[in-house]
Image: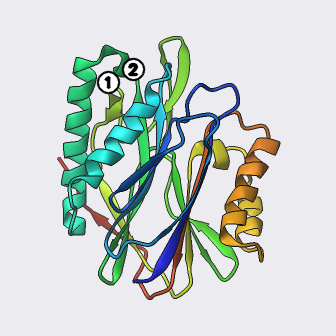
Amino acid sequence: MEGKVYIASSIGIHLEQNKDSILIGQEVFSASDRDNDLNIERDLPETGLVCVADGVGVTADDSAVSCFFLETLAGMHINSPEMLPEAMEYANHLLLDLANHQPNLKQMYTTMTGIYLYADYNFCVHVGNTRAYILRDHHLEQITTDQLIYLPQSEVNLQINQDHIYIQGVPKRVDQLTVFECLPFDTLLLTTDGIHDHVAHDVLEQIMSSSREQAQKLSKIIQAAKEAGSHDDLTAVMICLNSNRISHLDCNCSSD
């Protein structure tokens, strides 16, 4: 399958590190340095994951959680969608083990939303409040659902995924994969909450449907989030497809 992946990521205002990480195939990207925002273009991998992960916690080390999780997935050579729940569980196990040996990681966790490219199908795997959208005929549809609860922790209030409670800062399980259709020239968008909590859906749709170059669309989305008052890290990943795919069926793939 031919296509392109574009990344734009910018550190949040007054934050020491960008806690967002991105996976494309076997490559993991993280804009951890304030002076080095990410603006990247890559060929779409024939098979593999394209993911965004958002580390959350109370110290500068939360970026290590999202990056470690994606690096673990990148090294697992996932060659079928059936492997996804097991891969997530294994990456979770390694991250728990890391947290047990590094106390500074125990109060942290990571969200993750990814698109898995396989044969004639696309699969969306999702944990937390990062999001995936599909743009078709100038209409932007959200294909993930935020699953959040309000939870006080360490003198701060964090929103935690209700079905995937984070233990010592990492996801407990993945329950569901979603199979979804892509038509030729559909575009997929992955975002962290620093963007979609501040940029309205119709604004995202307008930007994504514009005649701008793809990289310019992502820059405009980042700019819109900043202008709307977002102080969080900002990451948007665009997947531009040039082939046929198949759609919107739910299949339960429990890792329990």
Q: Name the outermost residue toward the top.
A: 155
Q: What residue type is labelled 2?
A: Gln
Is 195 rendered above or below residue 100?
A: below
Specify whether 15 is left or right of 176.
right
Q: What residue type is labelled 1?
A: Gln
Specify whether 225 is left or right of 246.
right
- Under tag 2, what secondary structure? loop
Q: Quadrant of residue 121?
A: bottom left
Q: Name the outermost residue toward the right.
A: 227
Seen from the viewer's position, the closer of residues 154 and 147 is: 154
Specify whether 228 is left or right of 167.
right
| Residue 103 position in % (x across, y down) | 31, 15
Residue 162 seen by the camera: no
> Label 1, on which residue?
168
Is 9 rendered above or below residue 133?
A: above
Q: Residue at x 71, y 57 (%)?
A: 219
Task: Please give the label number shown on residue 107.
Answer: 2
Seen from the viewer's position, the closer of residues 108 and 249 is: 108
Q: Bin the neighbour count of mark 2 within 10 Å (Cα to Cα): few under 14, some 14-19, many 20 and up.
A: some
| Residue 10 position in % (x across, y down) | 64, 43
Specify whether 220 is left or right of 136.
right
Tell me if label 2 and label 1 are in contact, CB under 8 Å: yes
What separation in Å lies between label 2 and label 1 (alpha carbons)? 6 Å
Q: Residue at x 75, y 66 (%)?
A: 207
Is 139 rendered above or below residue 41?
A: below
Q: Residue at x 49, y 39 (%)?
A: 148
Q: In which quarter of the image is residue 105?
A: top left
- Under tag 1, what secondary structure? loop
